[in-house]
Image: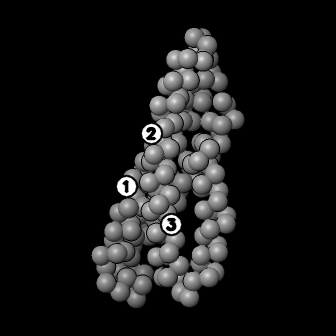
Amino acid sequence: ALIVGGAIVLGSAVAPVVFKAARTRGEGGLLFGAILARFDQLAILAVLLLVVTSVLKLIAFEDIAIGPRLIARWAALVVVGLAVLYGSAWSSPVARTLREQTKNFDELPDAHPVRAEFAKLHRGSTRAMRVALLAGLAALFLS
């Protein structure tokens, strides 16, 4: 729920307001990047808690007969975990580091290798968040 709700709030409420209020797109990117850094920490913690609570639920409350619904839910949970780990533990932090370590990042042309690498990581992180959101909704539905 934290991952799904966080992704929805960040994408539909926080990002539009931050980028609208910022003086420049670069400033908006820095502000939203800082917000995402905090969310990434929470998302990674949520994945760890998801693993622990899912195992506990399996042991304590679930029927021994493993059926397609349970398998589908576990598959969705695996996808959520992998997507969050890719986006929040690798892609986003690497993109933020590239941006922070590159002087005058916002003035670089789009074709510059650092900007191109940042864009690639950003796209990957965005896709990972969408995948985690969709798989999380599926897992919630199947729970």
Amino acid type shown at disc 3:
Ile
Amino acid type shown at disc 2:
Leu
| Count of numbered circles in the view | 3
Q: Quadrant of the N terminus?
A: top right
Location of residue 78 in the rendering, given as x and y in whole percent from the top left corner: 49, 36
Q: CA distance from mark 3 to mark 2?
A: 20 Å
Q: Nearer the viewer, residue 120 or 45?
A: 45
Q: Earlier in the sequence, mark 3 or mark 1?
A: 3
Location of residue 19 in the rendering, given as x and y in whole percent from the top left corner: 59, 78
**Few, some or many residues within 10 Å of mark 1 (<14, 14–19, 20+):** some
Amino acid type shown at disc 1:
Trp
Give the label on residue 90, or none.
1
Give above or below for 79 relative to 27: above
Give the label on residue 137, or none.
none
Displayed quadrant of residue 91: bottom left
Image point 49% across, 82% down: which residue? 27
Q: Earlier in the sequence, mark 1 or mark 2?
A: 2
Give above or below for 56 relative to 10: above
Query: Are the residues flagged by discs 3 and 2 in contact, CB closer than 8 Å?
Result: no
Give the label on residue 35, or none.
3
**Rendered image coloring scheme:** one colour
Please state if 28 lies on the left or on the right of 111 as rendered: right
Judged by depth in the image, the label closer to the viewer, 1 or 2, is 2
